[in-house]
Image: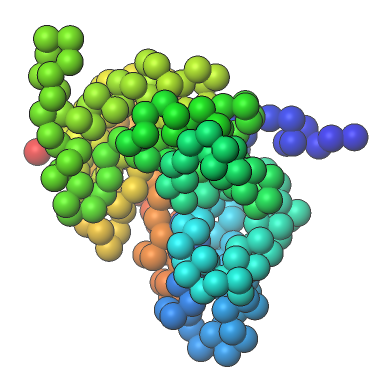
Amino acid sequence: MKNIIDTLTFKEKIRRRIEKINSLLCVGLDSDFAKLPLKFKRYGPREGIFLFNRSIVQDTAEFAAAFKLNLVFYAGYGLSGLKALAETTFYLKKNYPEIPLIADCKRSEMQRSGKLAAREIFEEFNFDALTVTPWFGFDTIEPYLKYRDKGVFVLCKDSNPSAGEIQDLVIKQRKQKMKLYEYVTDLVVNHWNKNGNVFCEGPLTYPLDLKRIRQIAGNESLILIAGLGPQGGKVKDLRPIINKEKNNILVNASRMVIFAKKPAAVAKKIKEEINHLDNNAEIE
């Protein structure tokens, strides 16, 4: 008999998790082997990364609405890293089945390659959601739509310093001028979200643009937010998009949590800071 968790869609699963633990924090397991403490590194990439991840999960699970794993920090170490990735997702699914797993992989493929990408992420590694880039258009999204219980996050605007070189370009659509990231956001929520499982990803490092993404996406749409911490994003900049009744954001924190001396304390602090935000304030 299937566990009830196994029958939920990604959207249902993430809402359920957020409400249960009252947290909007997504912990990013960007476990770069080169940066691991020596007590883990001495085991080599496969075992070392997995043991490190297990310790972080055990420390932070009570505060985590989701875990997000950036696949380059695993694939960059070859087969050993990919085995560590598989062991991590297996461990999480077995021991924390109620916590959704997001693959930060930017898997934007088409046709046959897209079908294999979906199989890789959802069947081989058993993730609940993934990230994609929008630059192939709807062809990027289509291979994932047959997995109606899974989630797809489209990178509407990135958190890196040069994101605006392309994503802030002004275009003309329907006699209106808009920035390219605004047009992509509109495509995501009004055209590509055919099954109710396609969402936006936006940058905390550009709070005004993040606010604009929320305005276009509406209050119901879930947004994955990147850039908190070392990239420069601040919790206070979430104020204009916080809606405590909707629980409609996931705020990712990676390095600032997993490489902290006390990951649990940092995760708890971020959770509490987000929960105490007043959404009546405006970005200055």
Q: Is residue 15 visible?
A: no
Left or right? Give the position of 271 relative to 74: left
Please determine whether, in this image, residue 188 is positioned above or below residue 78: above
Q: Is residue 216 visible?
A: yes
The residue shown at (30%, 21%) is 186
Outermost front residue: 112
Q: Return the x and y of residue 179 as percentages of the image width and height.
A: 15, 28
Q: Return the x and y of residue 121 as percentages of the image width and height.
A: 60, 47
Question: Looking at this view, is 109 or 44 the one in front?
Answer: 109
Quarter assignment of residue 139: top left
Left or right? Give the position of 238 relative to 145: left
Left or right? Give the position of 256 relative to 177: right
The residue shown at (41%, 60%) is 254
Question: Looking at this view, is 142 or 23 the one in front?
Answer: 142
Quarter assignment of residue 79: bottom right
The residue shown at (38%, 24%) is 188
Q: Return the x and y of residue 71 as percentages of the image width and height.
A: 50, 59
